[in-house]
Image (tube, rainbow, N blue to C red):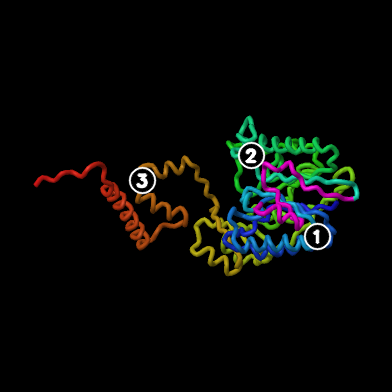
Amino acid sequence: MRILHTSDWHLGRSFHREGLLGHQAAFIDHLVETVRAERVDLVVVAGDVYDRALPSVDAVAVANDALRRLAGLRVPVVITSGNHDSARRLGFAADLIAAAGVHLLTDPHSLDRPVQLADDHGLVSVYGLPYLEPEALREAWGLPTRSHEAVTAAAMGRVAAHRASVGDGGRSVVLAHTWVHGGQPSDSERDIAVGGVTQVPAEVFAGVDYVALGHLHGRQRITETVRYSGSPLAYSFSEADHTKGCWLVELGRDGVEQVEFVAAPVPRRLGRVQGRLADLLRDPSYAGMEERWLQVTLTDSRRPRAAMEQLRTRFPHALLLDFAPEGLADTPHQWADRLRGRSDRDVVRDFVDVVRGESADDNEQALLDEAYEACTSQRQVEPAAVQVGPPARIAS
């Protein structure tokens, strides 16, 4: 059985205000063509189909197009929900949709009911572990602790119990949306920490032929049979060096026989550059960055005026601008010393000097003083507007 493992589509997400639906639709085209060209027998999507619990109409249309085309190829699809999805909304009408070969496994209380498929070597049972919220399941499942490890171990215990009850259930595949020990995060995943505990040991999935993980956005091999496919597009500049795509898994009679990575198209590459503004604008070595989405860190000792506007004359897709002035090495103690004994008005003026590298001119100082006075007078007026107790009696 040939399995295509993908996850974390995050349909509807934007990238620093740049819409990505067109790029996500291009990935769906690639996915469908891969299924056709590689004669894929099963597609598994390990959560975060959407970027938010209430996806936009356009995001739903892209998902609908993907599932309609895969169903048209008569290739079964198994999907579970991630921490960005609404499990109930994603799983709506799951029983009806399953008739088309699209299986939405989003209910944690039904995770021991697998989708069963068959190939030349017998049965393959596919279990879906949606994102498991420890607090929501702790009491219902009688968990001793509130952690991702506890809830995932309990879920896999239910999977193991089901496999034991049916005897020879054949080979097994598990979809899980979680953070497994050894997985490296990027800057674009939502924090799922519970009391500081976020990760699950890979050993909890022992005995499973293949584990298709979702949540972390970089492709990763935790073990030979426990893997993250990563997101199909980069969703943060920390992913600039990632290769995006899907795992193509060959499941044989005795388990996984071969795994290869199928790279996805890159509609627009990311880049990160650092240097002084003048150098970035004229240095020919940066020519390859001109069509990329860029994160730029300027090292000028003084913050240039209209820096982003100047950058975009050469790099029209610059999106994120940071400043790290050369030679700046202030510590928290130095900042405390600088602020000690200074008035609020002086601190406000200092702020301009620090972030821009030069002091406010006379007109700017007058505007800052005016804003400061307005805020101060507002703070003085507000308490008088709150009446506590009965009004005072005025003697006639």
Q: Quick check: 112 left or right of 124?
A: left
Q: Which residue is mark 1?
A: 74
What residue is drawn where x is 83% and y is 46%? 124
Residue 54 placement (x, y as % from top left): 58, 55
User: Is 81 or 292 nearer to us in this picture?
Assistant: 81
- List x then y, in percent, for residue 39: 85, 59
Judging by the rendered image, the residue that carries numbered circle 3 is: 342
Q: Residues within 10 Å of mark 3 (few under 14, many from 20)?
A: few
Residue 241 visible (yes or no) = no
Nearest the camera: 242 or 258?
258
From this view, report whether residue 222 is shown above or below residue 266.
above
Which numbered tag is attached to residue 198? 2
Magenta segment range? 90-119
**Helix, strand or loop for disc 1:** loop
Q: Nearer the viewer, residue 58 or 233?
A: 58
Q: Along the polypeptide, which appears first: circle 1 or circle 2?
A: 1
Instruction: Tell me the CA gap for discs 2 and 3.
Output: 43 Å
Q: Where is residue 395? Give x, y as percent.
A: 10, 45
Q: Position of residue 338 (x, y in %)?
A: 42, 44
Pointer 2 with pointer 3, Cβ within 8 A: no
Q: Compared with residue 313, is residue 192 higher up or lower down, i.e. above or below? A: above
Disc 1 + disc 3, Cβ < 8 Å: no
Q: Amino acid at mark 1?
A: Arg
Q: CA distance from mark 1 to mark 3?
A: 72 Å
Mark 3 belongs to which amino acid? Arg
10 Å crowding of disc 1: few (<14), some (14-19), many (20+):
some
The answer to which quarter of the image holds residue 275 is bottom right
